[in-house]
Amino acid sequence: MASIKDVARRSGVARATVSRVITNRGYVSAETRRRVEAAIQELNYIPNALGPSLHFKRTQTLALVLPDITGPFFGAIARGAEDAANRLGYHIILGNTDESDEKLEDYLLFLAKKQVDGFVFVPTSQDVPKTLQKHRIPFVTVDRQVNDDRVDAVRADSVGGAFQLTKHLIELGHRRIAVINGPQDVSTACDRAAGVIRAFEAAGFPEPPEIFWSEWSESLSYDRTKQLLTTVPRPTAIFATNNNLFVGVIRAIWEAKLRVPEDISLVGFDDIPPVVPSVLMEPLFTVAVQPTYEIGRRAVELLVARLEGKDADEYHHIILPVDIIVRKSSGKPPDMNLDN
Amino acid sequence: MASIKDVARRSGVARATVSRVITNRGYVSAETRRRVEAAIQELNYIPNALGPSLHFKRTQTLALVLPDITGPFFGAIARGAEDAANRLGYHIILGNTDESDEKLEDYLLFLAKKQVDGFVFVPTSQDVPKTLQKHRIPFVTVDRQVNDDRVDAVRADSVGGAFQLTKHLIELGHRRIAVINGPQDVSTACDRAAGVIRAFEAAGFPEPPEIFWSEWSESLSYDRTKQLLTTVPRPTAIFATNNNLFVGVIRAIWEAKLRVPEDISLVGFDDIPPVVPSVLMEPLFTVAVQPTYEIGRRAVELLVARLEGKDADEYHHIILPVDIIVRKSSGKPPDMNLDN
DNA sequence: GCATGAGGTCCCTTGTAGGAA
DNA sequence: TTTCCTACAAGGGACCTCATG
């Protein structure tokens, strides 16, 4: 690989002059510039970015570490992040944690060694990872919160989304609403539970609804829902707090041959991916949709702003609104007349 | 950020000694090692990988450049690639091209400056990108072919998949099969057309089926299918050669209120993502499924093998088999009795 | 003031050569 | 001789100072 030295020799100038040509700084005569550019062509010279990185202590590289790039939710976040990074002159290194704390710490450490300028990551626990804490590397959390306010964070309004969905069910007349939720140590699950509870309080109900905590797992959700359908009286509506859980619920409902929404109403967080047009799905699902692409985009923008020293002392929590899309999976409860 | 120099000063030894402690090479007394390790702790020292990268001309970083990380096909490829890279001690920088030649070249050039060790990319045209050709940077193409055999490549068996699907339709009795295909300058589209033609030849039919070339676009596929349904006699089966096209076909069929497979049979390349369990979809689709995760994994393994100098003169074309999953969207043609 | 060259320093780490105990 | 450690160069580039036309 040709280096700046080779170009200098070939064009008969000093290294500094080549540097001046490339960076477009300082005085360079037209003739010299021509000769240098010719040498660059002939040698197929590509400037080595490691030099400047070493010099400026900047690699123009960010790390994006999330549970799993496969799937529409984190996939779209990644795309939003990559687009923003690209626009701002950065590149993105990707890491998948599969929700493992250990894997997350591994990535953080290795990528810190590689001198990435900052991290965008989805927390796998409530704690700020040690590596970041110890080494004061800039970062932005996405999707989930950590138990420290002095961080930059971008996430969707889980509380609001859950509140709206629940309010929607309540307004339709539902009282026995079951919530199939994620793990208790993940902030999005807690927030969605909080939104449900708030909606019940706002409606003046004395008792909060039953909330089932587990993993973000389709099969656990399926099992739980099957069990739930045997209780008497049966819930008139089920709220699944993410995509995976929702699928488990749907499967169980389908198998029980219940009609939606005539026998039971369903609402969920995160939309069904649009690959299969919704026209194919009966019923069409009422959901809260998170602005995934925006989450990724805003996270990178926030991180880059911090890297460039804006608002050095302030921490930003960006909470993006979710869209409530009311479709056909939610309707009046079957026992409305009995209930009231 | 503390550097090796700071550690050396703090522990009262030379830089090289610190290096020996870190890399576990050469002679270091137990006492010196202890002192150095203490200093590393106290200073929160993280070795800067830019140093070794400069020295060894290796960054342990690969680039993955594909059309769009969003969506199940490239998403799974990315995951397979990242897992393999991680296992082999590499990291992955991600780029999205949106099928643009220009964006692809941009990424290649910028990432070459960053000294990535090699590229895995999805070609956006039949030509090997200039940057790679000129600078002899190792690379592996995935999914699509380029018009040069002297490259490493990993892809699924499009010809075979299309052959099998078509054969399946022919065996069911179909003769008027329409193929909704991608652009003529993308190898996967050509290969799938070739597979269809080969199946017709194998069956001893004099005429090949009608193949409609366009973009990988849902809406174009939708338009084309609507038009197609007005022809007399109507095709008895449609083969959509990728996911997007398939969705367009399905939409058009749905709107025309045709029954599948009673009125018309449908087969497609790439499965519908499993987020919505197939139990929800009527009918269940007959498809050729590509081993996406494997494609990504094998591509990175192949690239790393080349980087490490194995088989320096040989080029590997890895063609992975596709799974034909026969479900309910394909059946006997409605006019079977008339036709025969 | 303009245009360049020469030379050095810095960024960080590693490998080699060689000195000292 | 063996063990332990230091000094130096190299790797690629940016930038700065001086000096010289």
Image (spheres, coloured by chain):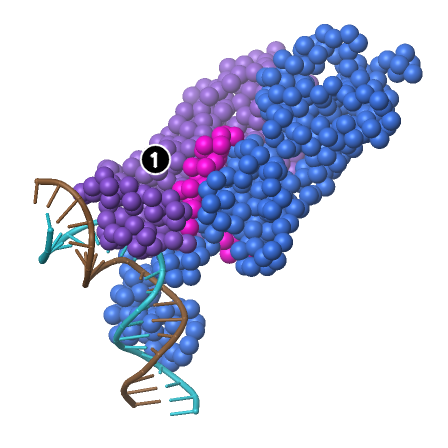
Chain colours: A purple, B blue, C brown, D cyan
On the rendered structure, is B69 left or right of A318? right
x and y percentages locating residue B33 in the rendered image: 37, 75
Tell me the residue that label 1 is attached to: A88
User: Which subunit holds the residue at mark 1?
Assistant: A
When the figure is inspected, residue A332 is found, relative to residue B241, above or below; the finding is: above
Query: Residue sitting at 29 percent across and 44 percent down?
Result: A35
Q: B47 or B50: which is nearer to us?
A: B50
The boundaries of the magenta stretch are B86-115
Name the element at disc 1. loop
When the figure is inspected, residue A46 is found, relative to residue A174, above or below; the finding is: below
- Could one spot residue B3 in this view of the protein? yes
Please identify the quadrant where the N terminus of chain A is shown: bottom left
- Could one spot residue A178 in this view of the protein? no
Other residues around mark 1 within 10 Å, as few (<14) / some (14–19) / many (≥20): few
Inspect the magenta stretch and tell me whether residue B108 lies in it: yes
x and y percentages locating residue B28 in the rendered image: 38, 78
Query: Residue sitting at 33 percent across and 72 percent down?
Result: B16
In the rendered structure, which amino acid carries the disc numbered 1?
Answer: Leu
When the figure is inspected, residue A253 is found, relative to residue B292, above or below; the finding is: above
x and y percentages locating residue B110 in the rendered image: 40, 42
On the rendered structure, is B217 left or right of B173? left
Inspect the magenta stretch and tell me whether residue B5 lies in it: no
Query: Residue sitting at 46 percent across and 30 percent down?
Result: A292
Please identify the quadrant where the C terminus of chain A is shown: top right
When the figure is inspected, residue B197 is found, relative to residue A85, above or below; the finding is: above
Q: A163 or B98: which is nearer to us?
A: B98
Q: How many marks?
A: 1
